[in-house]
Amino acid sequence: VSVALSVSIGATIGLVAGYLGGWVDSIFMRLMDVILSFPSLLLAVAIVTVSGPSLRNGMIAVAITQIPVFARLARSMAISIRNTEYVTAARSVGTRSGGIVFRHVLPNSLAPLIVQSTLGLGTAVIETAALGFLGLGQQPPFPELGKMLADSQQSLASGKWWVMLFPGVTIILIVLGFNLFGDGLRDVLDPRLKK
């Protein structure tokens, strides 16, 4: 949910800023620079601390920290696409800017956004687990991998290492799976890698 939220908001901001350029681009990208100037986990912890610990607030915080990544990617794609022949042709027949962005620029920007969103899923899992480990994620009695790791620290001190092993390995496998999936998608969707 957090990645879908960050992709939709970030891609919209990036496409609009990249296509329009000028002062709109400057304002949006300086706002993204401000968000990027903070470490993502620290910003997520600050947001959840202010809004209160819950799964919903954690997902919103993780989404906010990932918006600039997708905005920058969509902006760079929009800048490279806005002066192509088909966009110039659409402009010459009177198509509005919004129509050009969502009919021509967005479809040609989807492949990198899809790949980055799969990689963003791994980041979201790690940040959500970290928030849960700190007690800022999903609250008991609901299970959460970060909370399981935090609770298993006492078992580790008494020699029950396996209690910490399974949540940790689960987080590693989930993140590794999303990253490998993203790499595979990049290999399939990136025309520069095709031979």
Image (cartoon, rainbow, N blue to C red):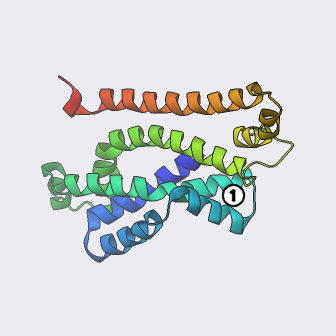
Q: Is 66 rendered above or below residue 146? A: below
**Residue lying at 44% horizontally and 63% vertically, measured from the top left:** 36
Identify residue type, mark 1.
Asn
| Horizontal relation, residue 160 to residue 189: left or right | right
Q: Is 45 rendered above or below residue 31? A: above
**Residue lying at 44% horizontally and 57% vertically, measured from the top left:** 10
As helix, strand or loop, the secondary structure at mark 1 comes to helix
Viewport quadrant of the C terminus: top left
The answer to whether residue 96 of the structure is visible from this angle is no
Q: Which residue is the extreme one toward the left?
A: 85
- Indicate the position of residue 29 as horizontal and vertical percent values: 36, 68
Q: Is 53 rendered above or below residue 186? A: below
* Front one among 80 and 66: 66
- Indicate the position of residue 23 as horizontal and vertical percent values: 29, 77
- Indicate the position of residue 142 as horizontal and vertical percent values: 82, 41
Instruction: State the residue position of label 1.
Output: 57
The answer to whether residue 54 of the structure is visible from this angle is yes
